[in-house]
Image (cartoon, helix red, strand yellow):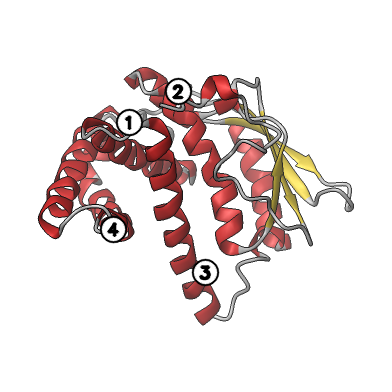
Amino acid sequence: MVAKIVEDFYVRKKTKFMRSFDERLTVVNKELCKKFDDKKSEELISQMKAEFEKFLPEISYIGGQKNPFTLVLVKCMSDLAIFRTLEKIGFSFKEIGEFHYNYVIAAHKLRKEVLEKAGRDPSQYPFDPAYIDYQKKLAEEIQKKVYPDDWVRDFVEGDGASFEWGWDVQECGVQKAFKKLGDEKYLSLICLGDYYEAEGLGFGFSRTQAIGYGAPICTHRFVKNYKTPPAWPPYELEEFDTKYFQEK
């Protein structure tokens, strides 16, 4: 299959993506206000928006709206805009990581409330049979490798005991994007976001290897009746490698 590249996809969808970023910046701003006055926080929010807007034309096309990982890629690029802004004002790598944890957890708690109000149990969504079936089909589609900057991953059947299902990710779209921009050092922080989602929504997640920590694959596993271990700070995680986590 020949890839059809829509060069201006992200520019044409700019209003939508900026609106989504604004929603994310609501929780980011609350964290900023714990450290700065309102004027400084507002100034930093404006800088984050400008940084993200600058990124949009540079994001690789991986199928647009037909690929759900497009939204994942855009969200991670918005995180990079936040990281860069904080780095410019003197935040250390570890301080950026802690700030990231705080606003991502806050966002997932809001998401949890929305799901619960809709009568859904957020701790069970990864184990819904329809969702698992969808992930199987998506993994098959990805194996066609239509877009070179997309993810490549295998669906892993669970054994019904140690885990329900999982992914083995051989190639990561975020890693490719960050590497192109010279910001691959931040990939390890993005990887931790998988744990934050599980912590925030209350489902079981485990991983022994992560590309962001120098491994050849990411071994995502979704586990029923399991309490996801705290991932911040990440020192006790099996995947952790201090070489990919700057202390200063």
| Crowd around label 4: few <14 · some 14–19 · many ≥20 (10 Å) | few
Q: Secondary structure at mark 4?
A: loop
Q: Amino acid at mark 3?
A: Lys
The span from disc 4 to disc 3 (Cα, nearest Å) is 23 Å
Residue at image x 88%, y 53%? 160
Residue, x 29% and y 41% (percent of image)? 82
Disc sitting over residue 176 in the figure: 2
Q: Which residue is mark 4?
A: 34
Q: Quadrant of the C terminus?
A: top left
| Image depth: mark 4 or mark 3 in front | 4
Front residue of 219 and 134: 219
- Determine contact: label 4, label 3, CB under 8 Å: no
Which numbered disc covers residue 112?
A: 3
Q: Nearer the viewer, residue 138 or 28?
A: 28
Q: Is residue 23 left or right of residue 89?
A: right
- Look at mark 1 in the image and give the residue it sits on: 59
Name the spot of residue 225 as percent of width and height, x first.
79, 62
* Three-letter residue code for mark 1: Ile
